[in-house]
Image (spheres, rainbow, N blue to C red):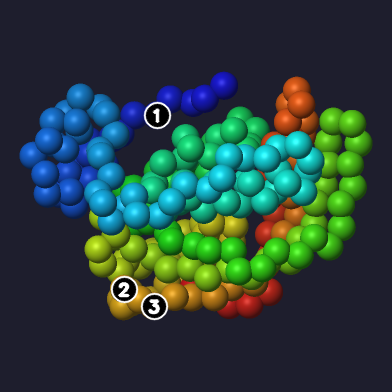
Amino acid sequence: MKLAYRFTRATVVIIAALFLFGSLCACAQTGKKPAKSSQATARKAPVAPDLSTPKNAVRSYLDWVSYAYYIVDSDVATSTMSPSEEVRVNSYVQLNQEEGRRIDQNLDSLEFVSAKSTETSATIVTKESWTYRYLSLDGTSASSSPMGSMGSMGSMIETPSTSALNTFFHAKYDATYSLVKEGKNWVVDSVKAKATTAVK
């Protein structure tokens, strides 16, 4: 079941100020999501989720959550996660909207350390390497993340107050994914991650 969310007045003001098109103001007044700029939608959507096995489901989850963080729309990734995980991801996307930023992150490497499963649940342990940067909502300038906010993998992040548009950061994680089976599909129910390098 998808959860419905409404923009607060403050969020609408922030988004309207960032997108300099008159039509967006009308969308904000009607409660619709603002249209994405050409910069914001430059990243291609991942391939359709493969939820046939726990490992494939984790890969699809990471691909689609990364895309959701980039276009600042959690709805696109909901097929890869349970309702409880959807709440967590949506909360972080809403925070990014209110702070006027998006995350451009890419998975450089993914190693499956272990996998355990029953008929209805599974636990996957991974080692991951990421490259990422913070951008403004329209994707045309660099942005920063406030001290102490929750990062894409659920860890605390500390970001300099200013950064260049082409500044990329690198991070490594040990992560544990809990999955549940919904019908014929495996979906991520929760994620526990520990950064093994500094995360900015």
Q: Residues within 10 Å of mark 2 (few under 14, many from 20)?
A: some
In percent of width and height, residue 164 lies at 31, 78
Of marks 3 and 1, which one's residue comes earlier in the chain? Answer: 1
Among the 4 quarters of the image, the one containing residue 162: bottom left
* Element marked by disc 1: loop
Mark 2, residue position:
165
Quick check: marks 3 and 1 in contact, CB under 8 Å?
no
Q: Judge by depth and name the residue closer to the eye, 44 or 104.
A: 44
The percent coordinates of residue 138 (x first, y second) are 26, 55
Q: Quadrant of the N terminus?
A: top right
**Residue occupying image coordinates x 65% and y 33%:** 82
Mark 3 or mark 1: which is in front?
3
Residue type at mark 3 is Thr
Compute the Cα span from label 3 to label 2: 6 Å
Residue identified by numbered label 1: 5
User: As shown in the figure, which amino acid type bears the numbered disc 2?
Assistant: Leu
Q: Position of residue 128 (x, y in %)?
A: 68, 66
Q: Secondary structure at mark 3?
A: loop
Near mark 3 (Cα within 10 A), the count class, few <14, some 14-19 or many ≥20, is: few
